[in-house]
Image (spheres, grey):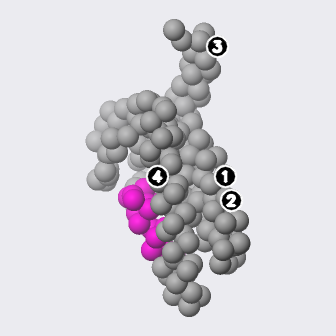
Amino acid sequence: MTNPSGTQSLNAIDRIDERIDELWDVLRGNPVLDRLFYTASEAADFSVVWHTLGVIQAILDDDPKTAVAISAALGVESGLINGPVKSLFKRSRPVQEVARPHNLRQPKTSSFPSGHASAAMVAAAMLSRRGKAPLWYTLGAIVATSRIHVRIHHASDVAGGIVAGVVLGEVAKRAADRLL
């Protein structure tokens, strides 16, 4: 039996997600924004962009532990978010009614929370250990919001992923600061 107040909350979240999606339609179809968001979304599949940036930062810092720490944090994040957390929620993904302007992998896991968003925040936290936090969090925000733009996630999925990623990123950053 479902909790009536829980059902009302879910309906309110669904309405908010629908409204954000409607408002976001103003941005969809713009060739520059489509290219930006589709590229960001695809580059962040399997956290490839984050692992790559970690390796680049390790090379620039002449410290391979930097890349190892970032990859380890992303591995823990992925294991938690894409495993037990997504298993708790059986949320369907947004329906894509028209053809996408660019190819994109369609995940088969639950929509909530967004793994791209959580990984982006973990990576931003870890990359910002050496400075330039605004740059890393801006890049993370682009990846996170790309999932709304390409209609792979609802806005609340992205918000949930951001919150989880900020928490996990802070834990990972503190652990790395102690260990490295």
Specify few, some or many for label 4: CA neighbours under 10 Å numbering under 14, 14-19, or 20 or more.
few
One can see residue 86 in this view: yes
Identify residue for label 1. Answer: 167
Residue corresponding to mark 3: 5
Q: Is residue 44 magenta?
A: yes
User: Residues at badges 3 and 1 in contact (C-beta under 8 Å)?
Assistant: no
Say the numbered circle drawn on residue 140. Answer: none
Which numbered disc covers residue 79? 4
Q: Which residues are magenta?
A: 40-54
In whole angstroms, how far apart are the C-alphas of marks 4 and 3?
31 Å
Assign a secondary structure to mark 4. Answer: helix
Q: Position of residue 39 (x, y in %)?
A: 40, 61
For the residues marked 2 and 4, what is the alpha-carbon distance in whole angstroms?
Answer: 17 Å
Tags 2 and 1 touching, CB below 8 Å = yes
178 with respect to 55 (left or right): right
Asked if labels 1 and 4 touch by Cβ distance under 8 angstroms, the answer is no
Residue located beneath label 2 in the image:
170
Image coordinates for residue 26, horizontal then vertical, percent: 51, 42
* Of marks 4 and 1, the one in the foreground: 4
Vertical placement of 145 versus 47: above or below?
A: above
Q: Tell me if mark 3 has few (under 14), some (14-19) or many (20+) residues whose alpha carbon lies within 10 angstroms of its own.
A: few
Q: What's under tag 2, amino acid-wise? A: Glu
Q: Residue at x 51, y 77 (%)?
A: 67
Label 4 or label 3, whichever lies nearer to me, is 4
Tag 1 or tag 4, which sits nearer the N-term? 4
Q: Amino acid at mark 4?
A: Gly
**Of the residues tagged 2 and 3, which is closer to the observer?**
2
